[in-house]
Image (cartoon, rainbow, N blue to C red):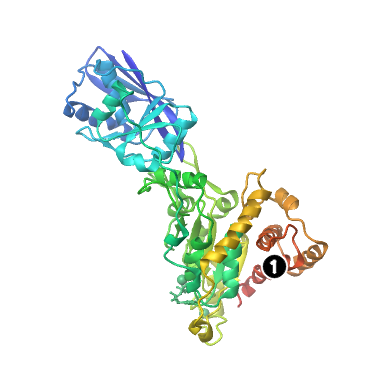
Amino acid sequence: MVSRLLSFGLQGIDAFPVTVEVDLSGGLPAFDIVGLPDPSVKESRERVRSALKNAGFRFPARRITVNLAPADIRKAGPVYDLAILLGLLVCNGDLAGSFSGMGIIGELSLLGEVRPVKGVLPMAIKARELGFRALIIPAANAPEVQCLDGLKLYPVGHLKEAVEILQNPEAAIPLQTIPFQPEKPQDFQVDFSDVKGQFIPRRAMEIAAAGGHNVLMVGPPGSGKSMLARRLPTILPPLSFEEALECSQIYSVAGMLKQDLCRSRPFRTPHHTATYVALCGGGQQLMPGELSMAHNGVLFLDEMPEFAPQVLDSMRAPLEDNEITIARATGSVTYPCNVMLVCAMNPCKCGYLGHPTRKCSCSPGEIARYRHRISGPLLDRIDLQVEVPAVTYEELSAKAPGEPSEPIRERVLAARARQAERYRSESITKNADLTSPMIKKYCPLSPDAEELLRQSFDKMNLSARGYHHILKVARTIADLAGSDGIETAHVAEALRYRAERENESKDALFTL
Ligand SMILES: Nc1ncnc2c1ncn2[C@@H]1O[C@H](COP(=O)(O)OP(=O)(O)OP(=O)(O)O)[C@@H](O)[C@H]1O
Ligand SMILES: [Mg+2]
Ligand SMILES: [Zn+2]
């Protein structure tokens, strides 16, 4: 007799349906799993055997063959334990019922408890997409799927609960859906009012938040770069349900979803010792990297020149494509990574080059080496590059606090609303994601603005990418000003956030 139950596998953050076929036949007792299982799936046999016995069922002393279809995709992890066990019960005659449209996922303990697995959220989303009726999931994974509707979800803590649900589906009570609530602004621990002075860097953060642009801050130690970056989440728009699902799927696959869905925008701060795998993903236990964990949020690289140059450079393609593909012997996986990159660095190793009062102790060679750690092509991908000068005593001792986050956030939200309206027929939602053909369509310059940009192009030695970035930033500045067209003032302001970089000779770079 052959039983057939449905489960799910994972490829990157995409789930795919797996049919778990169990066959009992005569012959010497044996227990085989076929269908490209990796060693972690094969170990399932021991867990299933013990769990079955310890839960009081009979283990069949016959030849057991389990097939995981489709047989050409590699299966990993203990997620099929529960489906294999239930399939065995069906073959044994211990369980009867109709299981069509019912998915089953869960790892087993030797005592028959159902343990949490990775990737339940993408599996549930896939099940809903494929028109599944219901899904049995580990109880511990329930919080991550409780905002999903359109699918009955049955959390179980023990295999006996799963047996009861399958035997008597009418009596089973599915998980109650809870509507999604993004994090409230008042939940933030920090606020922009803490930052004194620094008007231009603050303005750059506002523009970056409004258009989703990448930012680089250059300045001496203690000028407030880390402080500014950490306050960026307080002025970003709240996470939408779709964005929350996207982020949460990545965390779910990584097994890092602690509670329910992500409610706030990711803000990731990898240490500068981060390796390629830590930043971009991969590794033996295929994991998304920091770039993907920051999807829909901010990736903050503090002390940027301390990162290994090759590691930084490996971000070039993903930053452009908004996704990262990791090639593996068993096929490649793609993780999304639409991030706002925020970088901070000192102007030189000692930090005081160009400081009004302190003297820089670096040699010209040291300064050049320090700067060469960040490649031109990577810098070229950063739309806004801003100097964060040392704060003066007057600014710091001023009684009046800086402008708080709330009004800034309101301006950002208004600018984002204009963008969402303009791009409603496109696949993008913000200016940073504009492609070259879209830039032509959506960034109309007034004749004067056009003339200014034409003159600057040669004078500043702009690259084609640099030119497009200026147009995107100018588009955002115009959106903040509530203007449909891009005027001279908008282009002029956009140019200033690029000026020092484009005026290359690499040595003139960052001269403050
Ligand atoms: N503009 C400012 N307004 C108020 N406090 C400030 C300002 N800038 C710096 N500070 C104070 O100095 C501390 C250090 O600032 P922060 O860590 O942001 O500096 P940094 O620019 O990141 O320096 P480093 O280059 O050493 O990383 C802050 O915690 C804050 O107390
Ligand atoms: Mg810092
Ligand atoms: Zn120096």
Q: Give the residue drawn at x 63%, y 70%.
A: 506
Assign a secondary structure to mark 1: helix
Considering only vertical position in the picture, is 217 above or below 23? below
Taking the view exactly as shown, the residue that stands out farthest to the bottom is 357
Which of 395/280 is in front?
395
Using the rendered view, name the quadrant where residue 87 is placed. Answer: top left
| Residue 9 in picture, x, y percent from top left | 41, 33
Using the rendered view, name the quadrant where residue 55 is placed. Answer: top left
The image quadrant where one finds the C terminus is: bottom right
The amino acid on which the numbered mark 1 sits, given as a three-letter code, is: Leu
| Residue 1 in picture, x, y percent from top left | 31, 12
10 Å neighbourhood of mark 1: few (<14), some, or many (≥20)?
many
Q: Circle 1 is placed at which residue position?
A: 495
Q: Give the residue drawn at x 47%, y 73%.
A: 194
Considering only vertical position in the picture, is 65 above or below 17? above
Answer left or right for 5 relative to 201: left
